[in-house]
Image (spheres, rainbow, N blue to C red):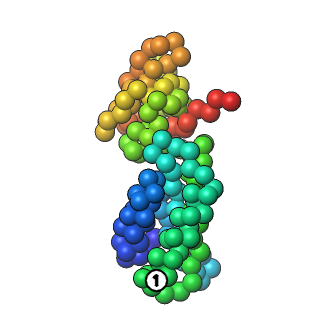
Amino acid sequence: MDEMLVQKIAPLIEDLIQGFGLVLIELNIHALGGKTGIELFIDKPKGGITIDDCAQINRKLGDLIDQQNLIENSYVLEVSSPGLDRPLKTVKDFFRMMGRNVRFFLAQSVENKMEHVGLIKSVNDDRVLIETKSAQEVIIPMAFINKARLEINF
């Protein structure tokens, strides 16, 4: 990833999406066949981004990049939702999922289990507290989480 470009564009992106009440989930900048590829994953603080939200941010960000002449060569800009099945990785990810059911796959067992599903009750820098279907509260250390995903119930 081109660090200088990231330093120029990241604050611009943050300001733009915060103005719309959105959050940046992930930013990827990479070479794309002689062009610069800019890939943004955005969401609403509690989830539920729409295609219209993504299209609006794409247009506005493209205009800002062009007006400020941030990229010398041509570029491809993609703005999308992180998706329902996106892995949760950061404290921010877990915080955004508070009040929702998440499935955790662990590197070390907690309560003699390597997998837990539960409603996220609280989050801090080193743990996630969930409530299971059986109303049991389980503390999952962040360091034990291999993978976690939103549990989709249809």
The residue indicated by pointer 1 is: 67
Residue name at image x 48 percent, y 26 percent: 119
Q: Position of residue 149 (x, y in %)?
A: 55, 38
> Which quadrant of the rendered structure holds the C terminus?
top right
Residue projecting furthest to the left = 125
* Marker count (numbered): 1
Q: Position of residue 40 (x, y in %)?
A: 52, 62
- Disc 1 secondary structure class: helix
Q: Is residue 92 left or right of residue 34?
A: left
Q: Position of residue 5 (x, y in %)?
A: 41, 76
Residue name at image x 51 percent, y 77 percent: 63
- Looking at the picture, tell me which residue is in the foreground, 102 or 23: 23
Is any part of residue 44 visible from this angle?
Answer: yes
Residue name at image x 45 percent, y 20 percent: 131
Residue projecting furthest to the bottom = 72
Residue name at image x 46 percent, y 76 percent: 64
Disc 1 marks a residue whose amino acid type is Gln
Q: Quadrant of residue 89?
A: top left
Q: Is residue 107 left or right of residue 85?
A: left
Circle 1 packing at 10 Å, graded few (<14), some (14-19), many (20+), is few
Is any part of residue 10 visible from this angle?
Answer: no
Q: Position of residue 92 (x, y in %)?
A: 39, 45
Q: Is 88 rendered above or below residue 8?
A: above
Q: Is residue 121 left or right of residue 147?
A: left
- Looking at the picture, tell me which residue is in the foreground, 61 or 91: 61
Q: Is 98 rendered above or below residue 88?
A: above
Q: Quadrant of residue 108?
A: top left
Q: Is 86 rendered above or below residue 150?
A: below
